[in-house]
């Protein structure tokens, strides 16, 4: 795939930018020309490692194989790969053509971008969405990938920040699309389901500024993100952890509330809002129910 820019760069001619020793991949972000990838492997390193995510644009005909489902791809396709969905991708003509951004979870964080990676619907845990692009859409996405690649070549002092912004531009534009196909991973072990829930919960913490608001708070919301029925999620989590989903969520919110009351100067309304409470009074009721003391009294007690 030739991505045109002001510098008229063709990505598939830049073989020197291939990851030669991917097992030692230490950068937070990389962009790959897939025409340089070994035809026996979609990506030249182990994507079962939880820290990796991808945003990939493919051209041509492929067969993508999940654990229990095959999907045929043709034309220009956009896919966003989460870390926990094993799959195989096979070009029907034997050649990969496209480009992929590969990055660790901490490349996009609340601190460095204002967003959390797992809050984006396209990186919803346990789900793989596939987008077929029209010709005009394909050109728009190619232009974004080209900007990302140009920053790699320029090696400017602002390279990482610019690549992060362009990757966010890519994600935001993709979220406006309707997927043509989806795969939902069927978690098959109690421990796997419980770990997925805990990881998603912890991805929202710590809260480091008043605008850092948790968005996934109820058992139903967690079940939706994990593509599970709420009752099934609760049953599996209770089997693994001995507590209900709601109990674990409430305990984590209580823990964070105590930290914010003790260590910050935020007012009660700011803390309540950051913890997902619509009104300070709702937070006061929650905190007093779980600690037998009001937030204001707790703050005074810990600071005296």
Image (cartoon, grey):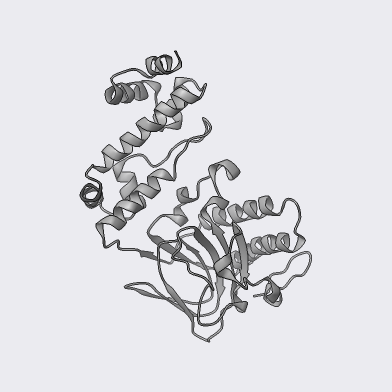
The structure residue drawn at horizontal position 69% and vertical position 64%, both measured from the top left corner, is: 149
The structure residue drawn at horizontal position 48% and vertical position 35%, both measured from the top left corner, is: 207
Q: Position of residue 283 (x, y in %)?
A: 36, 25
Measured along the vertical axis of the image, is residue 99 above or below residue 282? Answer: below
Please identify the quarter of the rendering in which residue 67 is found: bottom left
Measured along the vertical axis of the image, is residue 238 above or below residue 16? Answer: above
Residue nearest the viewer, comparing 288 with 229: 288
User: Residue at the bottom extreme?
Assistant: 93
Q: Position of residue 271 (x, y in %)?
A: 45, 26
Q: Is residue 259 left or right of residue 222?
A: right
Q: Could one spot residue 165 in this view of the protein?
A: yes
Residue nearest the viewer, comparing 237 with 165: 237
Q: Position of residue 199 (x, y in %)?
A: 39, 49
Please state, as top left, top right, bottom left or bottom right, where the N terminus lies in the image.
bottom right
The structure residue drawn at horizontal position 28% and vertical position 26%, both measured from the top left corner, is: 290
Q: Is residue 303 left or right of residue 251?
A: right
Q: Could one spot residue 134 in this view of the protein?
A: no
């Amino acid at each position: 795939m030739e991505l045109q820019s002001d510098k008229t760069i063709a990505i598939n001619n830049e073989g020197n930018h291939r990851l030669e020793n991917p097992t030692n991949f230490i950068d937070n972000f990389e962009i790959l020309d897939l025409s340089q990838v070994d035809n026996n492997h979609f990506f030249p390193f182990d994507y079962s490692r939880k820290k990796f995510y991808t945003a990939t644009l493919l051209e041509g005909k492929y067969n993508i194989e999940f654990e229990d489902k095959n999907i045929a791809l043709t034309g220009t396709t956009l896919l966003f790969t989460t870390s926990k969905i094993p799959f195989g991708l096979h070009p029907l003509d034997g050649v990969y053509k496209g480009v992929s951004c590969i990055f660790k979870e901490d490349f996009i964080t609340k601190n460095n971008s204002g967003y959390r990676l797992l809050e984006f619907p396209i990186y919803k845990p346990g789900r793989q969405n596939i987008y077929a692009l029209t010709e005009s859409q394909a050109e728009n996405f190619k232009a974004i990938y080209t900007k990302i690649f140009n920053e790699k070549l320029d090696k400017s002092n602002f390279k990482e920040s610019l690549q992060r912004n362009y990757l966010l531009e890519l994600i935001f534009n993709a979220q406006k699309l309707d997927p043509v196909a989806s795969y939902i991973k069927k978690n098959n072990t109690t421990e796997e389901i419980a770990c997925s829930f805990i990881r998603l919960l912890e991805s929202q913490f710590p809260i480091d500024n008043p605008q850092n608001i948790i968005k996934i708070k109820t058992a139903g919301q967690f079940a939706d993100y994990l593509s599970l029925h709420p009752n099934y999620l609760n049953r599996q989590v209770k089997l693994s952890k001995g507590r209900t989903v709601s109990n674990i969520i409430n305990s984590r919110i209580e823990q964070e509330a105590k930290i914010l009351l003790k260590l910050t100067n935020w007012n009660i309304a700011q803390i309540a809002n950051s913890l997902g409470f619509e009104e300070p009074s709702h937070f006061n009721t929650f905190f007093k129910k779980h600690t037998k003391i009001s937030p204001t009294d707790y703050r005074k007690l810990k600071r005296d």
